[in-house]
Image (spheres, rainbow, N blue to C red):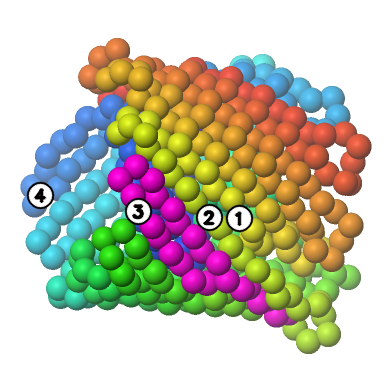
Amino acid sequence: MNSAVGVAMCEIRDKRKSPLWARATLVSSLVTIGQVAHAVTIDLPANAELTSTVNVELQYDDNVFLSRESPQDDWLTRVSPSMSLEREGDATSFFGGLTITRGNYRNGTRQNFNDYAGNVEWQWRAASLLQVHTSASYSDVAQSILGSQDGGLDPVLLEAERTRRPSAEVSLVFGRQGGKFQGILRQGKQKNEFDDSTRDFSADYSTISASYSVSSRFTAGVQVSDTKLDYGDIAGVPARDSDETVLMATAEYRLPKTQLLVRAGRLDREFAPGVRENFTGPRWDILVTWSPRSYSTLSFTTGKNIQESVGVADFVDVKSNVVSWTHQWTGRLSSSLAYSQTSGEFVGTNRSDDVVRSNFTLRYQPMEWLGLSIGAVNVENRTTLSDIDIETNRYILGIEAPL
């Protein structure tokens, strides 16, 4: 667990999200950052701001290598300085952020590491009915057990080794801000690189989405996306390249304390003729958010999607349930709790996995410029490939302060 700023920069978003899901993710991220960010902001010429912060964490990890047999434990110190540059103009806006993390194992159980995460975003309001967005991001992390959510659903794979994910996107947004209709065209590319190069793949995607506010409480929409997946070749393994098309209807219903988001539709994945069996099936996800008080929010997400696999499988057919609760106890004390169950069938093989994740964080701000946190993460992975489960527990003490 890094600081909220670091997590926000590290996030690799699902580039095929609908406007409704993108809006919900953004609101959630802003709330989290607002609770724990303790940074120095420097005003620069041309209405620009430079912000910096540093997060220091002491972690105890009881399974450093995510091993099924003879797990090894160690203490890990993570130092994560973050910097961001932001400028807001009359017609354009810019944001750039970078987080560098240095990890040191006290007993040398695993090699020390550097992680990198950065993103750049530029927006141009070309007219009252047209906006242009461009963005690029890069993450390079030594290990990932929580992963990046897809439509609010957790991933089924644990990444024990280093992953690198560069991406870029251009989008056009049509419709007046705050108006009833909004349309979005997206074109982007994401690469996924691993220490095992046979897992490398890239995704080129195009998305068209539109939404219409029927009333102040109800918004309906539709989303169509096409993604071309390009894998590296493995000797003796049928080609995994494919073309994926997703058609989904979206709906959002809002009450003063409750929000309901629903996406449902069909996913088609086509492989080269005679290489692998084509797939057609449902894709759906539901998010319910309840805020009985302005300082307390309970969220539940459930759904079904497909995720990319390792090795010879066509893909992973995934079902996931995620529940989370954030609460601001006082002006200085807040907490967050999350629990998820994710199951995946590796289509084309006899493998299936079940992953259970839970994490808790308690944050305290004794002074305006200082943030303290304590937390715990537990992950369990069961697979039909082995009778021995993977389990890891991490206990974290963090300090965040201006840089």
Stretch in magenta: 248-271
Real-space CA distance between mark 2 and mark 3, rounded to the nearest whole angstrom: 14 Å
| Front of the two marks 1 and 4 | 1
| Front of the two marks 3 and 4 | 3
Which quarter of the figure has residue 33?
Answer: top left
Residue identified by numbered label 4: 47
Inspect this view and state whether residue 138 appears.
Answer: no
Q: Secondary structure at mark 3?
A: strand
Real-space CA distance between mark 3 and mark 4, rounded to the nearest whole angstrom: 35 Å
Real-space CA distance between mark 3 and mark 1, rounded to the nearest whole angstrom: 20 Å
Residue identified by numbered label 1: 303
Q: Does residue 60 lie above or below 87 as drawn?
A: above
Amino acid tagged 3: Arg
Real-space CA distance between mark 2 and mark 1, rounded to the nearest whole angstrom: 6 Å
Which quarter of the figure has residue 331?
Answer: top left
Q: Are marks 2 and 1 in contact (CB under 8 Å)?
A: yes
| Front of the two marks 4 and 2 | 2
Real-space CA distance between mark 4 and mark 2, rounded to the nearest whole angstrom: 40 Å
